[in-house]
Image (cartoon, rainbow, N blue to C red):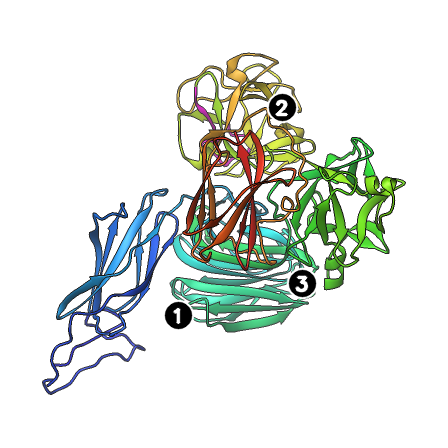
Amino acid sequence: MAEVVRPEGGSKDHLGYGSLTYTLEPSSFPPNPVPGVPLGLTATAGTSQVTLTWQPPSDLTANGYVIQRSISSDGGFSTIGTYNAYINTKYVDNNLTNGTTYYYRVAAVNQAGTGAYSAVSSARPLATGALPTGWNRAEIGSQNAGNATYANVSGGTFVVNSYGTDITGTIDNTTFVYRAITGDGSITGRITDISGTLARTGLMIRETLNDNSKAVAMTVGEGGWRFARMGYRTSTGGNTASRLGNTYTWRPAWFRIARSGNIFTAYESSDGETWFEVGSVNISMSSSYFIGLVACSGNATAMNTTVYDNITLTGSVGGDTALGTVSWESYNFADYFIRHQNAIGRIDPNVSPVDDKQWEMVTGLADPNGISFESVNFPGQYLRHSTNELVLDSVSNSSQQGDATFYIRDGLADVGWISFESYNVPGYYIRHSNYVLKIDQISGSTAEQDATFRQIGDILNGSVVQLKNRTTGLYLDGMGRTTNGSACGQWANTTSTNAQWTIQEYNGNYRVRNVSTDLYLDGMGRTSNGSACGQWANTTSTNAQWRIEPFDGNYYRIQNVNTGLYLDGMGRTANGADCSQWANTSSTNAQWELVSISSSSKIVSSIKEESISSSTTAASSIVENSVKTTGIEVYPNPVSNKLTIQLGEDYPENTEITLHDTLGKLITSAKVKGKIYELDFSTISRGVYIITVISPETRVFRKIVKE
């Protein structure tokens, strides 16, 4: 009888495939030979999983496959999966150990036997951690706090845990993981897994973070999580309307929302290549808005977990920088900083509020080879020139994007500093004149000094750390508690996100945010020695602001701004013991080591500020005005001896990697033959350096700290 080859697998017919093939007469043809070698095996890392894809042998005689895995490139393969009468060319290997490299090979089978194995492909799954720079999480409406984590695998993988009832009607009640964006833009992403309970999950654009905001969403939910739907609210507080997409959507599912002017269009796809429009709607929305991932469980007490990957944003996205929040000091007026005041750019000393002088140096809005100054306390607003003077303003068209874009040049007065040349008025530089900032042609030494600046940054800001007590070795732990006012505890060495904290500069001090719960470390206004430290949701109170000061070697003391008490472990050694506060003390109970979670290395307390002058330093890790978090992994950071740079599959052979110091001096460069490059840091002095990864299509920057 004729051989049956079925893409749907097994012996059952599936509606819509139309693949049942048979003959009533015996075949006169001889059996097929052993199949050839599968082609193009690719292993793609995820979180605790690796996805394999390949092409069938060129002779097209396979009716199944054998998939094998090893933890060594030299052999020791064992079978982890078989396909019989099933010619699907994809396999997902789950429940893997994050951080371990796995090696795979595939062979084709048919009635004649098993063919030769393919070339080996490898991947290293990673655990999720803190959200990347520029991304934030908000609870829209009133519900239990969810959380969101990220890993730089599979084109950027986000895991969002959410509560919330729905995103229908006149208000939303949902978790939203987002970025600020200005002007036209889009978000594309793939939903790979859904668990728990679900109302809707997918992508969203919204004008504000208020629950009744104008918004557009492309989601899946209902009907056994098969109904795709475009939802939209065209007026603030208005009802949400919707249009159905595919009612047989299955995972992985690709969604996209794009904005052009005030036209918002939603799409879906089964493979990320062929797209179908679900609907389009006209909404009069501010040019500065928010774009990201949305998920709600449909139950105030039950949680949904959605895994997204291949997240790509286009447009003028704020918040991407290789260096964190920075300030710019004048060359010829010491302690005078570039700031905004009443929407005017100028230089001043003793800036108050301090956020007026803080800037996110993001990818140039008009040219990714340039930079733009985004205000820290007015996200979505940028320094741009208007009739040659610098103003703080939103950017709504390509002309204004050009006004807000500058190129970093060697300092006109001192090459150890930097100057900013206008993108759309070449030969004109940012300078101060009577303390007001403008762009101008530069002639003479005074003007050169007026047009020269240096960057003042803080290595703590934006870092994700564990706080390890010097006396007990226990780590500060949020204990997974989500209630405002709940106590912080301590726990022995753990990889849980409960013991991971993001340090954020705020009003010249710091806020310390728990990665798991997003609550902030809070002194609760308590002034008694031994009183417990608490946690509180997003707050501007000085109770949640801390001074983090070097004290002894690699140890810090952490002082509450409101009460002046210091974070203190109290010598307690039991897991779960409360963490408390104490008045000025030199005890090791009040000393904390800041350990980077990406490397288990100490953040060295003697490194406080760096002056950055190379044109490479202000460029973003985002390239070509696209926010696809793709394919580069650099670890450990901080580094002591050896730095590993792992490139994604999209990077070609002979990708160039360079290392510069903070004055722009080239330390070393190399052409990479494979996907992994190791750089020797053992002879390099302590300090801050910039790694640049250069391919024909991209240029990516990373800040590296040498201990």
Looking at the rendered structure, the kind of residue marked 3 is Ser
| Residue 248 badge | 1
Tell me the element at label 3: loop
Q: CA distance from mark 3 to mark 1?
A: 30 Å
What is the x, y in percent for residue 438?
Answer: 84, 48
Relative to 465, say whether 383 is above or below. below
Left or right, 451 with respect to 130, comes to: right
What is the x, y in percent for residue 439?
Answer: 83, 50
What is the x, y in percent for residue 484?
Answer: 55, 34
Residue at left offset 27%, top offset 65%: 38
| Residue 446 badge | none
**Between residues 662 and 205, which one lies in front from this camera angle?**
662
The answer to whether residue 49 is magenta is: no
Residue lying furthest top in this view? 586
Residue at left offset 50%, top offset 57%: 311
Looking at the rendered structure, the kind of residue marked 1 is Tyr
Tell me the element at label 2: strand
Tell me the element at label 1: loop
Residue lying furthest right in this view? 434
Q: Main secondary structure of the magenta part?
A: loop
> Mark 3 or mark 2: which is in front?
2
**Between residues 535 and 148, which one lies in front from this camera angle?**
148
Task: Say few, some or many: other residues with alpha carbon within 10 Å of mark 3 (under 14 / 14 to 19 / 20 or more).
Answer: some
What residue did someone put label 3 on? 235
What residue did someone put label 2 on? 560
Q: Which residues are magenta?
A: 473-487
What is the x, y in percent for residue 352?
Answer: 78, 34
Looking at the rendered structure, the kind of residue marked 2 is Asn
**Residue contact at pointers 2 and 1, CB within 8 angstroms:** no
